[in-house]
Image: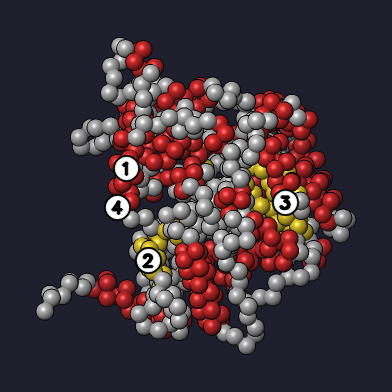
Amino acid sequence: MPRKKPFSVKQKKKQLQERRERKRQGLPDGVRSSSHSRSGSHDRYEEHTDTSDSESFTLQVRKLNQQPALWKAGEPGYDSNRFRLHLEKESREEIERRKKVTQEKIVELTPEAELEVDIVDIYKPGSVLDFPKRSPWNYTMTKEQLLVQEEKAFREYLEKIYSTFDPVKLSYFEHNLETWRQLWRVLEMSDIVLLITDIRHPVIHFSPALYDYVTREMKRNIILVLNKIDLAPPSLVAAWKHYFEQKFPQLHILCFTSYPREKPGETDPSAVFQKRRRRRRVKTMAVGPKQLLKACETITQGKVDLTSWKEKMERDAANTQHEDLTDEEDEDDAVLVEHQTDSAMEMCVPVDELYKDGILTVGCVGFPNVGKSSLINGLVGKKVVSVSRTPGHTKYFQTYFLTPTVKLCDCPGLIFPSLVDRQQQILAGIYPIAQIQEPYTSVGYLATRIPVPKLLKLRHPDLEEDRPGEQAEAKFTAWDICEAWAEKRGYKTAKAARNDVYRAANSILRLSVDGRLCLCMRPPGYTVQKEDWQQHTETLEIAALQEAHRQQSKQSSEDEDEISSSDQEDDEKDHDADEEEEEEEEGSEGGDVGKRHKGAFLSKNKFALLQNDEC
């Protein structure tokens, strides 16, 4: 008889909690509740098991962005990990295989035509690569019955996808039903849906299934926002805009960016070491709010009074002439924030009436890290939404009254199923970089599409420095690039003081996500017609718009900070690979204190951090 494994009190308590959860939801013993768990479990992985009459379906899921529990296990309360990212877990063998390939395979640049992507190849419109819909219900059903029905339908949805496509070819996509429930509620509330995409990877962030559902079934208007246009050439922005107009004629398309920046050369290596500065006082710096207002006026056709929105934009434009804003002026533009609770997720009838009570509700939907929260801050003119470089930072939807007649709704980022390469998804910023188990393949994917060694000015680690000719012709593997960057930045392991290639790989991926190593995908046929697009009328208009806002922001802000390309440690962007700090903005007083502390760090006096009143 095999010896029993030790069973701790903690494991026993967890087992009892899961048993109560199954009993509450009406699930049979042995079936584990996957999406609606309130137990606050800290498990990293979880099995989804289908309870239908079909063959059993088992899927390993990795939960990301673990948050500390604010209440003790077993006590009733809000589960801070309820809306964590749930993505498919990769096997250890697959991770080790890819790691070995990155140490052996030489990276070579591919032709520019290889950067062209078509949305048909990624999403296969009409296939099972759809998104889960809310299950039909009626008032005779209890809340528990509805939850069980939704979970069963969601498991069937997952089984249909994995039985049709090879899991190796599938992209990362959201396996957390709680997050999909947030999308359902936002779509039901919205009069207009803002689908926000990153201009560098727009076809990855645009789901044709969502477009069809909003325009055909819900009979709603959808506006496609090409965000972060400062990271792409104007000709590429115009080309993507025309591509979506031809493919999806019911779209209203506009360009947007919350942080206009100086125009760097497309192949200028110095642009890699320049920060995309985010200023404390953001007042009408965003590119695109006027275009959004115009689109909303076209859609509503006078059924909603948008005069207050127009007046607010005129007020903000006038305030940009004055750098020091008083507290009274800030209070005049205060934004009412509604924090949604679990009651918003309960059974409710979808609102068929448009513009209820004369209020226009605009829902902001999109993938993680495409800039939904930053877009709302850009529309408001100041920070009202917390933003972060970490995907999945927005955990639940919130509504913000931009004006008394305009309400914005911020939805958590959702990853739709597709056939896009997972490495491209990582470079698009949908996966938390600090939690990537094997980042070297993504670095190799990036290096085959842009000249990373040239942009980072890397020296091959296996060649001597006094031979510039050999260095110029050196061939790099993905592992060599990470090792050379670790040597250049001074990243060392704690004990053996070897080059920390894992931290270096994470640092390179962050440079890509931030746009300092900028990889932009092209629409089909762009390479052949590149010269025509550069002379296109709309290209010149976008370039003029970007230049006007650059001049405006340049006059009202300090010069851009530069990151030193030497081996000195970067205080802000290149922290430890397991750190993902939030982009929080402080008031003027806090900013002055921060400057004093930064100066104290650079001084030789190790006690200079202590102020006079702190000694």
Q: SS at mark 1?
A: helix
Q: Which residue is mark 2?
A: 46
Query: What is the tally of numbered marks visible in this picture?
Result: 4
Kindly report the distance in space between the C-alpha atoms of the residues bearing marks 2 and 3.
38 Å
Proximity of marks 2 and 4: CB atoms separated by less than 8 Å:
no
Q: Amino acid at mark 3?
A: Phe
Q: Are the two marked residues, 3 and 1, in contact with CB atoms closer than 8 angstroms? A: no
User: Mark 3 or mark 2, which is nearer the start of the sequence?
Assistant: 2
What's the mark number on residue 391? none
Give the mark, 4 or 1, whose residue is nearer the N terminus. 4
Q: Which amino acid does the dot numbered 4 rest on?
A: Glu
Q: Of marks 3 and 1, which one's residue comes earlier in the chain?
A: 1
| Image disc number at residue 99 | 1
Q: CA distance from mark 4 to mark 1?
A: 10 Å
Q: Is residue 281 visible?
A: no
**Who is closer to the viewer here, 354 or 209?**
209
For marks 1 and 2 on the same chain, the one whose residue lies earlier in the sequence: 2
Label 3 element class: loop
Q: Closer to the N terminus: mark 3 or mark 4? A: 4
Q: Earlier in the sequence, mark 2 or mark 4?
A: 2
Residue designated by label 3: 248
**Disc 4 marks which residue?**
93
- Tell me which amino acid carries mark 1: Lys
Residue type (three-letter) at the residue carrying disc 2: Glu
**In front here: 335 or 544?**
544
The quarter of the picture where residue 46 lies is bottom left
Distance from Cα at disc 3 to Cα at disc 1: 40 Å
In this rendering, which labeled residue sits more in front, label 1 or label 2?
1
Residue name at image x 56 percent, y 51 percent = 122
Cβ atoms under marks 2 and 3 closer than 8 Å: no
- 500 lies left or right of 456: left
Q: Residues within 10 Å of mark 3 (few under 14, many from 20)?
A: few
